[in-house]
Image (cartoon, rainbow, N blue to C red):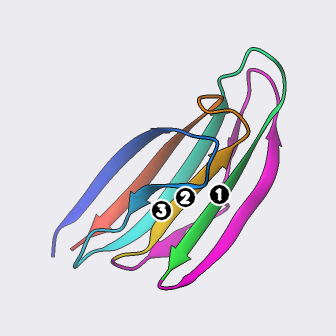
Amino acid sequence: MANNFSNYLYSVTSSLATFYTAPAGTTTVVIGCQASNKSNTGTVSVTLAVTSGAQTENLVKAVSIPTNASLGLISGKLVLEAGDVLKAQTGTTGDVAIVLSVLEIS
């Protein structure tokens, strides 16, 4: 059984788009998910959702991030099974950056 720690970087778009998919044959433990406000125009919002099979649920919806700040989007750990996906959306493409830290167990 292999355990791999990884970070994934994502510049959030204005449509709800997949930025991480748990690989086949892998269980993923999300250790952290930081979102930062890259905009110079004030507070921005971000939505984070998880899809498992045919069901999508918001983890946070339109949460505000102040200027020059970051926010942890997941409290505690989140387990993703193979094929589960994380999606994000913001008002203006490029206003929010996400750093996702995971442990992938295969």
Above or below, 45 against 32 in this view is above
Secondary structure state at the residue bearing disc 2: strand
Residue hosting label 3:
30
Contact, CB < 8 Å: mark 1 with mark 3? Answer: no
Give the left or right position of residue 59, taking residue 77 as reference: right
Mark 1 or mark 2: whose residue is earlier in sequence: 1
- What segment carries the magenta color? 53-82
Q: Hey, what amino acid is under mark 3?
A: Val
Residue 25 figure quarter: bottom left
Above or below, 84 against 93 in this view is below
Is residue 61 highlighted in magenta?
A: yes
x%, y% of residue 85? 46, 67
Query: In the drawing, what numbered circle is on residue 48?
Result: 1
Task: Decide: few, some or many residues near mark 2? Use Cα within 10 Å; few <14, some 14-19, many ≥20.
Answer: many
x%, y% of residue 50? 57, 69
x%, y% of residue 28? 37, 69
